[in-house]
Image (tube, helix red, strand yellow):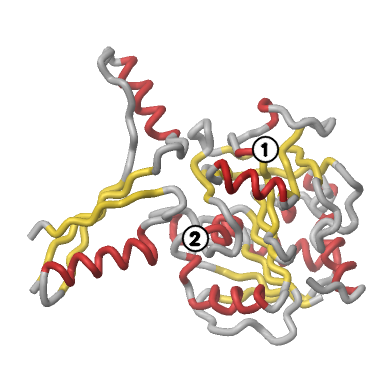
């Protein structure tokens, strides 16, 4: 079975997000006064051949640990979507 | 002095490193392709050069850190071999966990290509043995991701263990925010591992190793390594 696995990667609390800061400044300039903060992350979509959704998720998590995520600065979520 | 200069897809300072090693200390420097599983025999120094390995995709240095040649570089370092990572090479070293920390986008979010001055914090390393204490070196930086980051507790440990070898500073040698080009924590421009045989720095010594280039200060690093190895230094 082929599964689509979504990976969301966020910068950890306390890690300076210069991109988020710049985007936030621009949004404020556009008049979005309600905006408090912006954090910029990454979205990665994986197509994985696996026996089950659980296996696809485990594989996705393993890919995160081995390459996709730097756990010193990033947190991640892995979700099997179909 | 036998040197292996690793070439990843997207490295672009490898030839400059070879040139400066040959002209300053007469080194025999060989470029080694990233798919190699072994380093050339009797290599005494490995240099990971600057550039944009894998187009800086995902995270700078992340994919280069997971190439076959890096297994050999890791074994080499574990046996006490000298490893120098410059710019993208520094990013590869942190991504390989051969050095602590992560290198994030510059505080300014712009690519910075300019001369800067760095202060030598330690001259008891193979890379700085011929520098005077607190000597100020002028070398260019050229990067978009150069902000050295470590969580606070680990940063304190790095300071305590005296692992910071270069800090950005004013031409007079003072550390000031105005002279910290990328916002690095602790004004860090270069650090060394616990054993002292693996060093990463953002500035480019190979672009400042002869007077015609505006500064010959980078040659202090090549000369230091040369003299360390000549004297049979071991880490």
Q: Quadrant of the C terminus of chain B?
A: bottom right
For label 2, the residue is: B53
Disc 2 is attached to a residue of which chain? B
User: Is B204 on the left or on the right of B9, as rendered?
Assistant: right
B22, B145: nearer the viewer:
B145
The image shows residue B56, relative to residue A61, as above or below, that is: above
Say which residue appears at 11% left-offset and 57% top-offset: A81
Task: Look at the numbered disc 1 and give the secondary structure of its residue.
Answer: helix
Q: Quadrant of residue B72?
A: bottom right
Q: Is residue B76 visible?
A: yes
Residue B182 percent coordinates (x, y) = 59, 36
Say which residue appears at 90% left-offset and 56% top-offset: B130
Task: Look at the numbered disc 2 and give the secondary structure of its residue.
Answer: helix
Query: Do badges 2 and 1 share one subunit?
Result: yes
Question: Quick one: label 2 or label 1, which is nearer the N terminus?
Answer: 2
How many C-alpha atoms fall within 10 Å of the one at disc 1: few (<14), some, or many (≥20)? many
Residue A24 percent coordinates (x, y) = 35, 24
């Amino acid at each position: 079975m082929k599964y689509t696995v979504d990976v969301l990667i966020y910068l950890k609390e306390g890690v300076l997000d210069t991109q988020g800061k710049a985007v936030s400044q621009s949004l404020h300039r556009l008049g979005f006064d309600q905006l408090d903060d912006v954090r910029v992350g990454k979205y990665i979509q994986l197509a994985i051949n696996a026996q089950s959704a659980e296996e696809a998720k485990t594989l996705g998590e393993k890919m995160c640990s081995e390459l996709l995520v730097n756990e010193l600065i990033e947190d991640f979520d892995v979700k099997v979507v179909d | 002095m036998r040197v292996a200069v690793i070439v990843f897809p997207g490295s672009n300072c490898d030839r400059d490193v070879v040139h400066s090693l040959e002209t300053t200390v007469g080194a025999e420097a060989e470029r080694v392709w990233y798919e190699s599983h072994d380093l050339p025999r009797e290599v005494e120094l490995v240099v990971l050069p600057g550039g944009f390995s894998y187009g800086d995709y995902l995270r700078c240095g992340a994919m280069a850190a997971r190439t076959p040649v890096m297994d050999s570089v890791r074994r080499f370092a574990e046996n006490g071999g000298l490893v120098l990572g410059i710019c993208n090479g520094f990013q590869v070293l942190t991504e390989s966990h051969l050095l602590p920390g992560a290198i994030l986008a510059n505080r300014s979010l712009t690519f910075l290509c300019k001369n800067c001055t760095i202060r030598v914090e330690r001259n008891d390393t193979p890379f700085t043995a011929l520098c005077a204490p607190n000597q100020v070196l002028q070398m260019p930086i050229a990067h978009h991701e150069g902000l050295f980051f470590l969580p606070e507790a680990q940063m304190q440990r790095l300071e305590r263990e005296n692992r910071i070898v270069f800090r950005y500073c004013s031409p007079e040698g003072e550390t000031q925010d105005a002279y910290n080009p990328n916002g690095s924590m602790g004004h860090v421009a270069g650090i060394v591992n616990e054993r002292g045989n693996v060093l990463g720095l953002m500035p480019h010594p190979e672009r400042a190793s002869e007077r015609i280039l505006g500064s010959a200060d980078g040659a202090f690093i090549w000369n230091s390594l040369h003299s360390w190895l000549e004297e049979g230094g071991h880490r």
